[in-house]
Amino acid sequence: MRTTTGWQSLEPNSNALTRVTIERRDLRPDDIAVRIDYCGVCHSDLHRIHGMLGEKDLVPGHEATGVVVATGRAVTAFSVDDRVAIGTIVDSCGECAMCGAGQENYCYHRATTTYGGTDRVDGTPTKGAYSREYVLREKFAFHLPDGLDPAAAAPLMCAGVSVWEPMRAAGVGPGSRVAVAGLGGLGHLAVKLAAALGAEVTVLSRSTAKEQDALSLGATGLLVTTDEAQAAAARGRFDFILDTISAEHELTPLIGMLGLDGTLCVLGNPLLAGPKLWELGAGRKKLTSSGTGGLRQTADMLEFCAAHGISADIETLPSGQIETALNRLADGDVHYRFVLDMSDLDA
């Protein structure tokens, strides 16, 4: 077995993770070992540490970039020293209709998640990228394009592709009227990507506090949802609304802002109780969500981001400050994504 060092959640409902030694499997023929240099801190990490899915003893982390340090004997796509990115899934059945369609994230036999999953070969639990080394199948790793900063690119592997895939599925492009509700880790990337796709982008917010940020990210304006006049004037205005708000909130007002055949994609809190369904019928509107992205879409997103100079706005912290990052994330004190520098695990 290979060993490395990482951060594990051992105390229920605590943001104080413990530095531990982690076992990684010996390389199978199609495996690569990656030295993790940077890992994004996703809001779902916080939720799962606090028991959202009933899990225990997690090593979180599924937004990672690093460098290949070893390859299995059958590996052909990667060489030692290649820059790579790792996302939310590390295996799937490879045989079902979803896998055949390049949507391994929706594998009918359940994709293996980067952490909190079950290895398909030996049945061991997967431990994530809050660690100095990760081992995975080469098929589920991605070349990190030249020109993308590895720290700022890490959040693209979850936050980025989570907003990219539903926008591509909805055909967002020139002429599209897009709204982004919530300007956080997902929302700020949604604005950047939608604007680069050619859409007219509006940020939906409860106040004007982030108006200048919205404009600098590529939005054409900010709509204050608590202003009754502005909200009323927006009825039927948008083709596509991406809801990235993690707190509980009412969906019906957002549906009212959709035009004919418009789509509301709920990402920030997909467990919200559904709205009154008659609102969907008033204009053939659609309610949807998304589960990160498949391999094809993730690769396409990385190339698009490299071509358009898109990455996350980040604050980088040593991995030893993970408790600080999680506490501040819980308080909404982040602009717009924390990324952990894993090099301090060498000490």
Image (cartoon, rainbow, N blue to C red):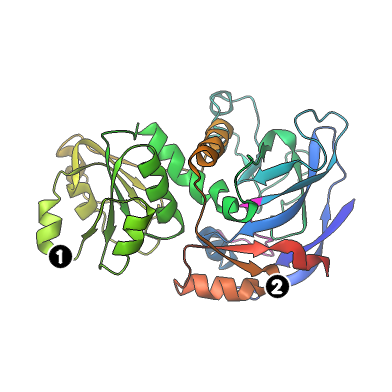
Q: Quick check: 120 above or below 97?
A: below
Residue 342 forms part of the magenta stretch: no
Which amino acid, mark 1? Asp
Horizontal side of 194 relative to 88 (left or right) equals: left
Q: Earlier in the sequence, mark 2 or mark 1?
A: 1
Q: Quick check: 9 above or below 262?
A: below
Which amino acid, mark 2? Gly
Q: Is residue 14 visible?
A: no
Judging from the image, what secondary structure is the residue with disc 2 in? helix
Q: Quadrant of residue 21?
A: bottom right
Residue at image position (67%, 62%) is 58
Give the labeled residue for mark 1: 227
Give the labeled residue for mark 2: 320
Instruction: Please state the horizontal and vertical placement of residue 41, each as a whole percent of the image.
Output: 58, 61
**Mark 2 Cα within 10 Å, few/some/many (few <14, many 20+)?**
some
User: Of residues 342 and 249, which is closer to you in this image?
Assistant: 342
For the magenta stretch, what is the residue range? Answer: 53-64
User: Of residues 142 and 174, which is closer to you in this image?
Assistant: 174
Q: Quadrant of residue 166?
A: top left
Q: Which mark is residue 41?
A: none
Instruction: Please state the horizontal and vertical placement of residue 37, each as a whole percent of the image.
Output: 72, 56
Q: Quick check: 104 above or below 20?
A: above
